């Protein structure tokens, strides 16, 4: 199979038929073999009914419906697990991503041998205040922190070599950082392509300002994981040693001062340096414990179910 198109969605019943017809037209005109995987992330409208009707008419349509809303990352994870195409394309279901971009994305992966191609919505039709400016700030911070030089981490239109999506773990709200996850997994050939962005035709956006706050928090998380995810003791142990040295230094100073310099002065427990020393050594010990616990969790962690699937269509 040439292409798998993975489409996470939440309450997008109005756009699904039009989106599939658009994708199918592009695939037929370019003679691609393909599948379209709709991942219904707990929709409360008739999205699943529309997907079921599409699958009954078209063998290329496959579907997964979650029991409830688990988030876009979990939807992508489920779609990636089932995708069979040589190239995997992700796009949003709101018709703001243009399927006409698929042939060029496919060419960049197959013939120019990139591991991942990320779309760049250079000209956007979103609100400047609520989305454009926060998005620019977020993308700048992501570039500086991750070292991946992309202009638009949030663009849902991306293309992947199949090996990439089978070797990365998308969880939490890490869908924004799939290029960073791919780079950390050993797939450094990442580029971007300017893609056409279209105004939303149906419904309203599912994202508010809170996504940018969560995005920055996730950015810190992925920075930590990329630097110290395999050996957390390297961070916590180093900080613990530093704090313990500071505490021990103050304790030694207090002891020497009391024994040799000013034996009849104030009691050690009445001096502020005593509390600095005590606090620093306690924090140092706690950091050491955190490092040890991190190492233990890494060695004995078990994979937990992150979502529950209610129904499948055309998937064994």
Image (cartoon, rainbow, N blue to C red):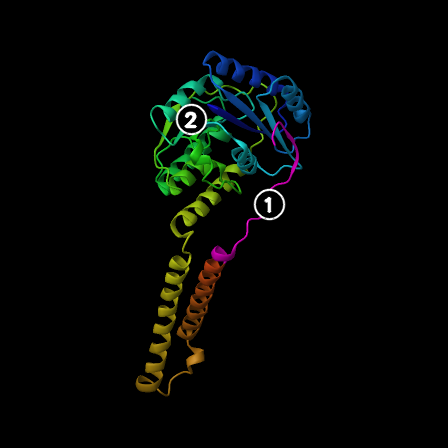
As drawn, the label of residue 286 is none
Name the foreground residue: 68 vs 268: 68
- Figure check: 223 above or below 237: above
- Dividing the image into 4 quarters, which one contains the C terminus? top right
- The x, y position of residue 268, in whole percent, is 41, 80
**For mark 1, what is the residue?**
305
- Figure check: 247 above or below 177: below
Q: Is residue 164 magenta?
A: no
Q: Secondary structure at mark 2?
A: strand
As drawn, the label of residue 119 is 2
At x 41%, y 83%, the residue is 266
- Figure check: 129 above or below 289: above
Indicate which disc, 1 or 2, sits on the residue closer to the N terminus. 2
- Figure check: 220 above or below 13: below
Q: Is residue 310 magenta?
A: yes
User: Contact, CB < 8 Å: mark 1 with mark 2?
Assistant: no
**What range of the chain is rendered magenta?**
297-316
The quadrant in which residue 82 appears is top right
- The x, y position of residue 117, in whole percent, is 40, 28
Q: How many marks?
A: 2
| Residue located farthest toward the left when viewing the structure as drawn | 261
Q: Residues within 10 Å of mark 2 (few under 14, many from 20)?
A: many
- The x, y position of residue 214, in whole percent, is 51, 41
Q: Secondary structure at mark 1?
A: loop
Name the foreground residue: 30 vs 252: 30
How far apart, in angstroms, are the residues tagged by discs 1 and 2?
30 Å
Name the foreground residue: 49 vs 197: 49
The quadrant in which residue 255 appears is bottom left
At x 46%, y 32%, the residue is 154
| Residue located farthest toward the bottom when viewing the structure as drawn | 264
């Amino acid at each position: 199979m040439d292409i798998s198109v993975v489409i996470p969605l939440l309450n997008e019943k109005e756009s699904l038929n039009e989106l599939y017809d658009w994708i199918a037209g592009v695939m037929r005109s370019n003679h691609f073999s393909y599948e379209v995987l709709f991942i219904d992330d707990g929709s409360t409208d008739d999205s699943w009914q529309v997907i079921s009707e599409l699958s009954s008419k078209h063998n290329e349509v496959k579907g997964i419906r979650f029991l409830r809303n688990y988030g876009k990352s979990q939807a992508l994870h489920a779609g990636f697990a089932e995708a069979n195409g040589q190239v995997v394309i992700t796009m949003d279901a709101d018709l703001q991503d243009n399927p006409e971009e698929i042939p060029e994305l496919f060419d960049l992966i197959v013939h120019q041998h990139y591991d991942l191609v990320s779309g760049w919505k250079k000209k956007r039709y979103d609100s400047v205040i609520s989305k454009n400016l926060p998005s620019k700030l977020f993308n700048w911070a992501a570039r500086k922190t991750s070292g991946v030089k992309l202009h638009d981490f949030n663009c849902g239109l991306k293309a992947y070599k199949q090996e990439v999506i089978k070797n990365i773990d998308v969880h939490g709200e890490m869908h924004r950082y799939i290029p960073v996850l791919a780079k950390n997994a050993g797939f450094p050939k990442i580029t971007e392509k300017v893609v056409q962005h279209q105004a939303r035709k149906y419904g309203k956006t599912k994202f508010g300002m809170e996504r940018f706050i969560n995005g920055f928090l996730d950015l810190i998380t992925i920075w930590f994981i990329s630097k110290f995810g395999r050996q957390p003791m390297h961070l916590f142990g180093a900080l613990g040693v530093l704090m313990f040295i500071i505490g021990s230094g103050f304790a030694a100073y207090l002891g020497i001062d009391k024994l040799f310099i000013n034996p009849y002065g104030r009691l050690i427990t009445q001096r502020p340096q005593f509390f600095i020393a005590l606090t620093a050594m306690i924090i140092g010990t706690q950091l050491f414990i955190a490092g040890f616990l991190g190492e233990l969790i890494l060695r004995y962690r078990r994979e937990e179910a992150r979502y529950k699937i209610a129904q499948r269509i055309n998937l064994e």
